[in-house]
Image (tube, rainbow, N blue to C red):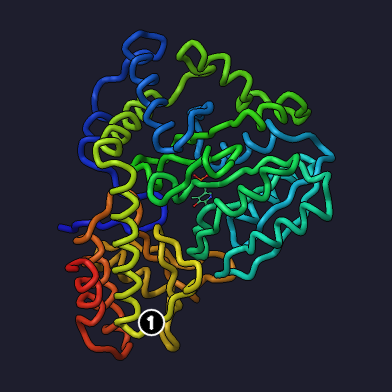
């Protein structure tokens, strides 16, 4: 027998009531029954996005919505400004390159957040920049950026602000409208407590003006096609019906809890996780801009980071994530996002301690759990 705990930054665990609706017989999508669900889901998404603008549901993983943003807003030969402080910032650059769009890159040291003033400087130096592409939470490093400050800067220019909020939306605060985010991109398998397979995207009025000028080729991910269908509570192609039904269920739970309470829960879990790591004498990888959805921790000297993650998963059923790209083996990432609460964190820290002790790391057994409990018990 094995009980599994999923503490990775996507996919994240699924609530039982969400799993339950996915086991029901399939219904047809061009029916009043499905339309009622779709309508309710879009209202719920607007609540989570904190927007009154258009929000579309796409059938793809999160990256599909990133691609949709690029091809609907831009034309080959345009220039964008990309903040690149990890693997997901790099994805924006790769996407632009694939469509012949030039990129100006702000290379941020991995583990640090971009300075909004740097974005301001680059926008002033090149007024031709059509879009600023950033990442709310750079999941590869565990850094959250100041979207509100960046939004104020981009607002007064001709550029649109596009935010990859795939990890973070519905877990930490992102006020799409109030923070002047023109296009906000998210996915189903992170804060929204669903399996992978859906992506979501919001489009502001300023962004629609860019859509009108865009000459990138597009078909499946066309915003105009999405809008035309959405106006009659429909989708241009067969939606992932089962996942949309699940989405509606997850959004009901989120509206019941309330965004403020959800954000507070994530903050508390992040505080507890960070305290636990300190209690174990471990060093955070991104101490100055630490995200409240995933904590990245430096693997201590003499410990095999990949083996640590593998043993926790394969011997004890607790899955955390290792480092990606240049951080492979150097950090581990402990996620606390979505359908996770206090005692999942305690179980995860307890398992981390068990395996660290087996691997010969010296610390006082229970110090991590104790530090986490002290945060939870106030
Ligand atoms: C997970 C993630 C993605 C990738 O999403 P897919 O669903 O795998 O396409 C993109 N950006 C960030 C910040 C992520 O955390």
Q: Is mark 1 within 8 Å of ligand 1?
A: no
Dot 1: within a 10 Å radius of its alpha carbon, few (fewer than 14), some, or many (20 or more) residues? some
Query: What number of labels is visible?
Result: 1
| Rendered residue at 34%/77% (across/down) | 277
**Residue sitting at x 33%, y 26%:** 245
What is the x, y in percent for residue 320? 36, 63
- Please determine whether, in this image, residue 38 is positioned above or below residue 339: above
Residue 324 against residue 282 in the figure, above or below: above
Please name the residue shown 59% across and 59% down the image. Answer: 87
* Image position, residue 52 (x, y; %): 49, 28
Q: Is residue 327 left or right of residue 118?
A: left
Looking at the image, the residue that sits furthest to the left is 1
* Image quarter in which the C terminus is found: bottom left
Assign a secondary structure to mark 1: loop
Taking depth in this image into account, of 359 and 236 the one nearest to the observer is 236
Q: Which of 252 and 176 is in front in this view?
A: 176
Report the residue marked by disc 1. 282
Front residue of 234/22: it is 234
Q: Is residue 310 above or below residue 46?
A: below
Quadrant hosting residue 345: bottom left
Q: Where is residue 147 in the image (x, y as percent from the top left)?
A: 56, 52
Residue that extends furthest to the bottom in the rendered view of this protein: 362
Compared to residue 178, the image places residue 235 above or below, namely above
Q: Which quadrant holds the N terminus? A: bottom left
Q: In this view, does 78 lie to the left or right of 198?
A: right
Q: What residue is drawn where x is 63% and y is 38%?
A: 67
Instruction: Using the rendered view, name the quadrant where residue 64 is placed.
Output: top right
Percent of width and height locating residue 159? 73, 41
């Amino acid at each position: 027998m094995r009980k599994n705990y999923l503490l990775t930054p996507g996919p994240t665990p699924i609530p039982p009531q969400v799993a339950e609706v996915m086991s029901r017989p399939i219904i047809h999508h061009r029916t009043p029954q499905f339309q009622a669900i779709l309508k309710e889901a879009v209202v719920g998404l607007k609540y989570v996005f904190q927007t009154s603008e258009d929000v579309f549901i796409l059938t793809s993983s999160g990256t599909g919505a990133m691609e949709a943003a690029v091809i609907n807003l831009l034309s080959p030969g345009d220039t964008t400004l990309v903040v690149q402080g990890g693997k997901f910032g790099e994805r924006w650059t790769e996407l632009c390159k694939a469509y012949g769009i030039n990129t100006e890159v702000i290379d941020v040291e991995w583990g640090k957040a971009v300075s909004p003033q740097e974005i301001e400087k680059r926008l002033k130096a090149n007024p031709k920049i059509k879009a600023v592409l950033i990442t709310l939470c750079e999941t590869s490093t565990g850094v959250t950026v100041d979207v509100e400050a960046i939004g104020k800067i981009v607002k007064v220019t001709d550029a649109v602000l596009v935010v990859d909020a795939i990890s973070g939306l519905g877990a930490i605060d992102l006020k799409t409208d109030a923070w002047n985010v023109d296009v906000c991109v998210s996915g189903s398998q992170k804060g929204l407590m669903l399996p992978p397979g859906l992506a979501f995207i919001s489009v502001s009025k300023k962004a629609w003006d860019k859509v009108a000028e865009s000459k990138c080729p597009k078909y499946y991910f066309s915003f105009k096609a999405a809008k035309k269908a959405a106006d009659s509570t429909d989708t241009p192609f067969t939606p992932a019906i089962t996942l949309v039904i699940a989405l509606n269920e997850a959004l009901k739970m989120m509206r019941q809890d309330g965004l403020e309470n959800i954000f507070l829960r994530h903050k508390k879990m992040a505080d507890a996780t960070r305290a636990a790591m300190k209690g174990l004498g471990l060093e955070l990888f991104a101490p100055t801009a630490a995200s409240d959805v995933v904590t990245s921790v430096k693997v201590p000297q003499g410990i095999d980071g990949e083996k640590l993650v593998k043993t926790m998963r394969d011997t004890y059923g607790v899955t955390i994530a290792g480092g990606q790209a240049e951080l492979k083996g150097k950090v581990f990432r402990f996620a606390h996002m979505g359908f996770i609460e206090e005692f999942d964190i305690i179980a995860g820290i307890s398992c981390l301690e068990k395996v660290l002790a087996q691997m010969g790391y010296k610390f006082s057994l229970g110090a991590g759990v104790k530090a986490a409990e002290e945060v939870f018990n106030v």
